[in-house]
Image (tube, rainbow, N blue to C red):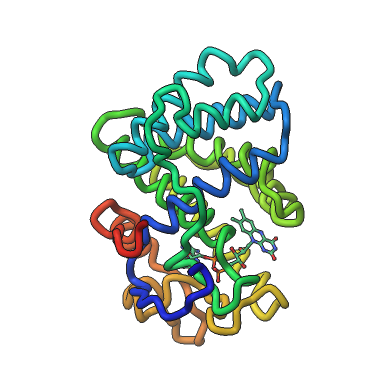
Amino acid sequence: DPTDVTKTVDRSKVYMADLESALHYSLRVEVARFTTLEGDRLKALYGYVNVLRKFFPARPYLRTLLNTLYSWLRLRWKTKISYKDFEDVLDNKKQSQKAVLSSDVNYVGCQGSKSEYRGFPCSVWTLFHTLTVQASEAAAQGRGKLAAKEVLYTMRNYVSQFFGCEECATHFESMAAESIVLVRNSDEAILWLWSRHNQVNKRLAGAESEDPKFPKVQWPTPEFCPLCQVTQEDGTVTWDLTSVLPFLKTHFSKNNIALDYLV
Ligand code: FAD
């Protein structure tokens, strides 16, 4: 039950259920708002699926599906497609196998105290952070030096073409337009997204959309990363980036993804 708040959640973990829910909702609901896709919008979808197939820490069946979707789009991204045809590939109709991308959302770490809170936008942030960190790991292993930068640009395009919250998309685009070009490598890409997310947290603290059980804070709090925030003599709090970066790389690493509550 998606509104069941009795799930035991470890806030120091990332949940695969949230990551897969983000995929489910983006590909089956957000993209589905467009009956036909072409031009920049189709290109944004193609880029998104390409990044997912390369960096989403997918379980084997889902990885196969993402590769299939990618191969299908690679032949068509310069043309015009109908969402219906895309959905057939998503449902794996031709292979007549069981669908591997869940048919509903199942939020765990992103579950709100009421159904109107958290959920999808929370899972999108979780997905984006995970992808930048996974891409930087790939880069460290020699698979594409600029991988995490590619993730940022792809996310920017996804948000502007598909993200259903228009206010969010406008805010995100203005942050991206302001500073995304300054990002030079994978570490900076991880930190860029983290600091922009904190900027959003600051702006939204106390807003109507805030779940009272999950107040917006500057993250990670000392509870999760004791060395990340440094209180100066005058009382101001600054970040120690040499602690923040390894913290983010660990938090969004494969080893920290919990498989609980998967259906
Ligand atoms: P979220 O902010 O969604 O965070 C999810 C989880 O990520 C947290 O529980 C925490 O574990 C972790 N986290 C928190 N901060 C960071 C950080 N700095 N770095 C890494 N991980 C972190 N809502 C609006 O009302 N107006 C907007 O303009 C708006 N813009 C948005 C733009 C984007 C691109 C996205 C994805 C969402 C936007 N939202 C906006 C939604 C909003 O940011 C939250 O996602 C939503 O309110 C749910 O909040 P939450 O408490 O689940 O935590």
Kindly identify the residue that appears in the image at 62 percent across and 64 percent down: 200
Seen in the picture, residue 52 relative to 206 is either above or below; the reply is above
User: Residue 207: x, y in percent?
Assistant: 71, 77
Number of marks: 0
Seen in the picture, residue 111 relative to 64 is either above or below; the reply is below
Q: Quadrant of residue 98?
A: top left
Kindly identify the residue that appears in the image at 72 percent across and 77 percent down: 208
User: Residue 35: x, y in percent?
Assistant: 73, 31
67 relative to 33 in the view: left or right: left
Front residue (pair 245, 237): 245
Kindly identify the residue that appears in the image at 37 percent across and 73 percent down: 11
Front residue (pair 185, 208): 208
Q: Judge whether residue 248 can be spotted in this image.
A: no
20 relative to 134 in the view: left or right: right
Front residue (pair 148, 34): 34
52 relative to 144 in the view: left or right: right
Residue positioned most to the front: 96
Instruction: State the quadrant of the C terminus.
Output: bottom left
Dividing the image into four quarters, tell me where ligand 1 lies: bottom right
User: Residue 13: x, y in percent?
Assistant: 33, 66
Q: Quadrant of residue 32?
A: top right
Kindly identify the residue that appears in the image at 68 percent across and 73 percent down: 209
Q: Judge whether residue 199 can be spotted in this image.
A: yes
